[in-house]
Image (tube, rainbow, N blue to C red):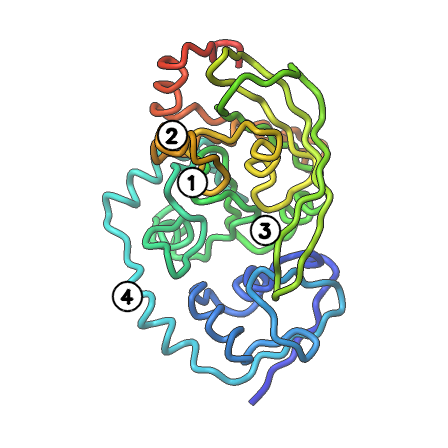
Amino acid sequence: MKKSYIVDSIYSNMRIDRWIRNNIEKIPQSLIEKNLRNGKIKINNKKVRSSFKIKSQDKIDIYNFNYKKNLIETSKKAIQPNSVIKSTEKQIIDNNEDFIVLNKDSGISVQGGTKSKKNLVDIFSQSKIFGNKKPFPVHRLDKDTSGVFIIAKHRQAAQLLTTLFRLRKVHKTYLAVCHGELEQNSGTWENILERYENNKLISEKAKTVFKVLDKNSICSLVEMKPITGRKHQLRKQLFIIGHPIYGDQKYNFKSNIKSIGKKLMLHSYRIKFMIKDKKYTYSALLPDYFKKLLKIKRLNHLKI
């Protein structure tokens, strides 16, 4: 048995795994990836990875697989302790009828995966705030990055917010502590970032506006406003110019790997957007470990 779908234009440039969760069922990430590998989910008759971005009018074929049985088995494993649910609810900055905004902790994934035991989707699907309804994450934030994150409460809000992100109508500000003293106090980074997808090398333009808030000979506190939204964009761009972020286990130099600890010093500080002429601005307080490092390194965060 095969079911076929044609991608609507509102989902253009969305990852296939996210499209499946938004339109089919709340299927665990591990199960989506397994069926993509096995060819039970194909795009235009081709096997793709979960990170593949679909386009308008793409044909998605989903061949018969018993995901509901697997979903029941997986959901039993994904039950979150009440203490985890309560502590995550305390991080909420705003809770309205369309979406919630929270200050996400470092070390917690947005969605489940093979290496993720705790994620926001599982937590809020069991929270009274969502009333047993499906949470809809509308953008990305790396597991190790803390800060502002938005989860929609229903499909219509999810589609609207996802479209705003895709059209770059959402303005994000990040803060990072990086190794070394940046020479320029402000400017724009423009790079060609490379990554592999489906065994193909993909080159993408990346653009970020930055401003150094404070610095010394050891490190710098940097404010960054990404114009594009490439994977690991800010981490890669700082690494390229020789100033990797403290705590970055992937993009670093051997000379500073032991001095960075386990926490990534990258924080999604502020997010701004507009819906029907109404402006929304949300800011997330710095985590204690972030403020502690600023104090140790004698960086002034009061300028933020």
Callout 2 amino acid: Ile
283 vs 102: above or below: above
Q: Which residue is mark 3?
A: 158
Callout 1 amino acid: Gln
Looking at this view, name the residue that lies furthest to the bottom: 1
Q: Indicate the secondary structure of the residue bearing disc 2.
A: loop
Question: Mark 4 or 3, which is nearer the eye?
Answer: 4
Judged left or right of residue 5, residue 50 is left
Question: How many numbered markers are drawn?
Answer: 4
Label 4 crowd (10 A; few <14 / some 14-19 / many >=20): few
Question: Mark 1 or 4, which is nearer the eye?
Answer: 1
Task: Point out the tag, 1 or 3, that comes first from the N-terminus.
Answer: 3
Task: Point out the tag, 4 or 3, that comes first from the N-terminus.
Answer: 4
Judged left or right of residue 125, residue 173 is right
For the N terminus, the image quarter is bottom right
Callout 3 amino acid: Ala
Q: Position of residue 173 (x, y in %)?
A: 59, 28
Tag 4 near tag 2, CB within 8 Å: no
27 vs 118: above or below: below
Marks 4 and 2 sit apart, C-alpha to C-alpha, by 36 Å
Marks 2 and 3 sit apart, C-alpha to C-alpha, by 36 Å
Q: Which residue is mark 1?
A: 249
Q: Position of residue 95 (x, y in %)?
A: 46, 37
Callout 4 amino acid: Lys
**Which of the two residues, 261 or 123, is positioned nearer the viewer here?**
261
Task: Point out the tag, 4 or 2, that comes first from the N-terminus.
Answer: 4
Q: Which residue is mark 2?
A: 260
Tag 1 near tag 3, CB within 8 Å: no
For residue 108, what is the image quadrant?
top left
**Which of the two residues, 205 or 79, is positioned nearer the viewer here?**
205
Q: Which residue is mark 4?
A: 76
Identify the residue at horizontal 71%, vertical 26% (top origin).
Answer: 188
